[in-house]
Image (cartoon, rainbow, N blue to C red):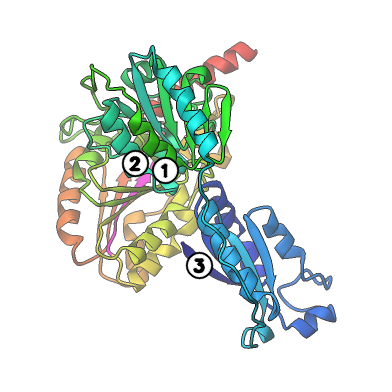
Amino acid sequence: MAALITTFGVGEMSACNAIAGAYSENVPIIDIVGSPNSKEQNEKKLLHHTLMDGNYEVFRKVYQNITEYTANLTPENAEIEIPKAIRIARESKKPVYVMVAIDLVTKPIVTHKLEEPEPAHSNQKSLQAALAHIREMLEGSRKMAALVDLAALRHGLEDSVQALVEKLNIPAASMMQGKSGFDESHTHYIGMYGGAFGSNQVRKIVEEADCVIAAGFLQSDMNFAKYTAKLDPMKMIVIQPDSVKVGEALYTNVMAEDMLRELHSIEYHQKEGTVPISFPNDVEANGEADHSIKAAYYYPRFQQMLKEKDIVVVDTGTLSYGMSQVRLPHGAAYIAQGGWQSIGYAAPAAFGACIAAPDQRVVLFTGDGSLQLTVQEISSMLEHGCKPIIFVLNNQGYTVEKILNVKTENQKYNQIPQWNYSKIPDVFGVPSFTAQVRTNYELDAAIKKAEKENADMLCLIELVVEDPMDAPEYLQKVRKHLEEQNQQAK
């Protein structure tokens, strides 16, 4: 878990987007807010950082909608509320909010006789009923598959899911929002399931399976690829952190770890195993050396440069679609906002990753439009001696918005000021390696140089793309789908 401390009013309102994103993405954070003197609050004085209406509860009420729990701490309730908030954040994987007045911080607390809450455990009758139902479903099954999604990743179920996949000898795919939830170097991994926009091989395996085990399943528009995903709910076993759904039958109070463990008792071992899979970027760096860089050329190069245990941070935009198809090496972590999708998220997230894991290499992939929102965090990275490798995709504006908006062309609001991104570290006055690349040869040379210099300094590579509408194949398919829908609506 992380802790965030802000000032009252203006500080916590600035943090709303980040906290809402953490709620959407199932990230536990203890959000601590320091509020004005309690006497001044009781007298409803008009103080700075307020709405000038004497209401000191208004901001906590805002946070009630974007956190799992809120509390206003006092000497009387602190011993109860603080551990309660931490427990809720830990169990729910959501942010919680605690506020304390500045004059109460040093006050002695009132002690209470407290009992430790019992850890969550499965209802055995419900667990066994679900297991019996699953056995019945699998009796005639010949082709199974597994899907790994967001909640499995957030609740640390990766090893348990992998062990089950190995025992059953079935193929496993990740969902868009659950990327990295299954070891992508594993022999049972077949890629990301993306409905009509992803790999046809993966789509065929998943959609033609007699039974699909889905761990941490989230039925979002991103995961369902604009709802082109064809998953029969009657053939699905959906394992959530505290429930299991078999077909249309829901079994509550069943812990995921218990369910995954019990499934090992099922006598099932798929004979066929995993068929050979062709991954989109498992190719040698293609394109002639003097060719202008484009998505078809740079994504295979990104995949080839990634190393085991890298922390890969990806911003929203064309990069999030393209990087979803890049196969991660063993032990690599993947950080992105698959659901909330707040542009500008990745640069500060990469800074956080550098601080949290100083011994791991952090590789940031961000777009020009995204970086312009939070570029100051490069200064923070340099100030704290962080040494990430940063790729800035300069495609002249919000390309992802231009692609998704099929009804109009040349939208002025999707243009942005043109920056020389490779010069940004110079502004902050700390030695760095930077390069601006336009061809495959220049990109190869810059990556090679960055891998060498990365041990000593921050590295930033700006990729200048000629075609502002260039995009990865996945996003091109999305565009075609939207164009067809637009035509049908006319």
Q: Earlier in the sequence, mark 1 or mark 2?
A: 2
Q: Which residue is mark 1?
A: 257
Q: Secondary structure at mark 1?
A: helix
Residue situated in front as seen by the camera: 64 or 345: 64
Real-space Cα distance between discs 1 and 3?
A: 27 Å
Is residue 305 visible in this depiction of the protein? yes
Which label lies toward us, 2 or 3? 2
Quarter where residue 17 is shown = bottom right
Q: Secondary structure at mark 3?
A: strand
Check residue 388 for magenta coloring: yes
- Residue neighbourhood size for the residue with mark 1, other residues' Cα within 10 Å, grouped as few (<14), some (14–19), many (≥20): some
Left or right of 250 on screen, residue 302: left
Q: Which residue is mark 3?
A: 3
- Residue neighbourhood size for the residue with mark 2, other residues' Cα within 10 Å, grouped as few (<14), some (14–19), many (≥20): some
For image coordinates 78% across by 68% down, the residue present is: 51
Real-space Cα distance between discs 2 and 3?
A: 28 Å
Region of the chain picked out in magenta, as a range: 387-397
Q: Position of residue 332 (x, y in %)?
A: 27, 48
Contact check, label 1 and label 2, Cβ < 8 Å: yes
- Residue neighbourhood size for the residue with mark 3, other residues' Cα within 10 Å, grouped as few (<14), some (14–19), many (≥20): few
Q: Which residue is mark 2?
A: 160
